[in-house]
């Protein structure tokens, strides 16, 4: 935890107050609901474009289309808002944006959309973690656990799970992956920003969980930097018990690869009928 500078906010509540002041300053000629939405979307776009280059061009165009709506002094406040949010989260996992959403009473403008209070999420997460007697064994076996949140809101429940694992002495940045989904774009942006700043490996999906609809995928920096797509396809982390068992099972196939000069693209656990790709001939066997 960093030491506060003189005359600077010294706790998360003060950083939230500063964030609210900045939002209100940009709302003198605009609707506060729209300003809040623009802030979290631009923050999400900025964080995503730092790591997710596949969608960078499209998201950069979207970012610039939002910036054009504001005067230069108003644009300058948005990075300050992100700085206050980041500073608030430096004190520990919390649903800062959910709290700000409630303190600004934006739920009235969101057609009755309310986010579960963080202290309730924290209690639920601790009960779930404490009741999962097999958690340690599962992590030892495959190296991580998967968390699914079909209606994530601002990400409070996911953040609470990360905090509960941290309290248990488990590094959630290495041992937890999250798939979070919400039908509301603002909720998706809120969750993505907070999970990104807390370095939680996650894919945040915009879409209707019940209808199996997925319109957008937002990959957190922790997901991309940790190569979680490969881990999820493989089903386990390197160094886990499953990895060790798989290496033992595929050892004969590795010898065959070395002898024939072939690269194993995919191998069944029992080494039966492996798919081979010839690096020398450039054709599939």
Image (cartoon, rainbow, N blue to C red):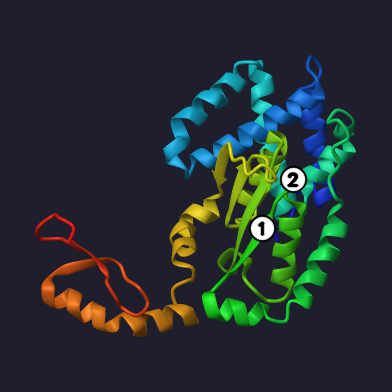
Asked whether the viewer can see residue 146, the reply is yes
- Residue 102 percent coordinates (x, y): 87, 40
Image position of 236 (left or right of 138): left
Asked whether the viewer can see residue 7, the reply is no
Q: Which mark is residue 148?
A: 1
How packed mark 2 is, by other alpha carbons closer than 10 Å (few <14, some 14-19, many 20 or more), is many
Q: Nearer the viewer, residue 108 or 183?
A: 183
- Residue 37 percent coordinates (x, y): 72, 30
Look at discs 2 and 1 and give the one toward the viewer.
Answer: 1
Q: Nearer the viewer, residue 248 or 67?
A: 248
How packed mark 1 is, by other alpha carbons closer than 10 Å (few <14, some 14-19, many 20 or more), is some
Q: Which residue is mark 2?
A: 154
Which mark sits nearer the N-terminus, 2 or 1?
1
Q: Which residue is at the far left? A: 281
Residue drawn at (44%, 73%), measured in percent from left and top?
238
The quarter in which the N terminus is drawn is bottom right
Q: Secondary structure at mark 2?
A: loop
Residue drawn at (74%, 72%), measured in percent from left and top?
167
- Residue 178 percent coordinates (x, y): 62, 57
Quadrant of residue 153 within the rendered picture: top right
Residue drawn at (56%, 43%), measured in percent from left and top?
218
């Amino acid at each position: 935890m960093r030491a506060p500078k003189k005359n600077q906010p010294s706790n998360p509540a003060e950083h939230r107050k500063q964030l609210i002041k900045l939002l209100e300053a940009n709302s003198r000629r605009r609707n506060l609901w729209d300003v809040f939405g623009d802030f979290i979307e631009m923050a999400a776009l900025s964080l995503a474009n730092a790591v997710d280059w596949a969608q960078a061009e499209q998201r950069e165009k979207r970012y610039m289309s939002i910036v054009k709506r504001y005067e230069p002094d108003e644009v300058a406040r948005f990075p300050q808002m992100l700085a206050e949010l980041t500073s608030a989260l430096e004190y520990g996992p919390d649903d800062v944006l959910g709290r700000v959403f409630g303190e600004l009473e934006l739920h009235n403008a969101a057609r009755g959309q309310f986010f579960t209070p963080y202290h309730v999420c924290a209690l639920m997460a601790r009960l779930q973690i404490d009741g999962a007697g097999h958690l340690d064994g599962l992590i030892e076996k495959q190296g991580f656990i998967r968390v699914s949140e079909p209606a994530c809101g601002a990400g409070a429940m996911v953040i609470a799970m990360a905090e509960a694992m941290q309290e248990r002495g488990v590094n959630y940045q290495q041992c937890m992956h999250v798939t979070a989904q919400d039908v509301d774009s603002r909720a998706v942006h809120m969750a993505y920003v907070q999970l990104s700043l807390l370095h939680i490996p996650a894919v945040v999906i915009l879409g209707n969980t019940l209808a199996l609809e997925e319109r957008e995928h937002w990959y957190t920096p922790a997901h991309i930097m940790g190569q979680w797509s490969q881990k999820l396809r493989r089903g386990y982390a390197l160094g886990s018990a499953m990895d060790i068992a798989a290496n033992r099972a595929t050892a004969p196939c590795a010898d065959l690869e070395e002898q024939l000069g072939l690269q194993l693209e995919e191998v069944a656990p029992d080494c039966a009928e492996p798919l081979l790709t010839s690096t020398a001939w450039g054709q599939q066997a």
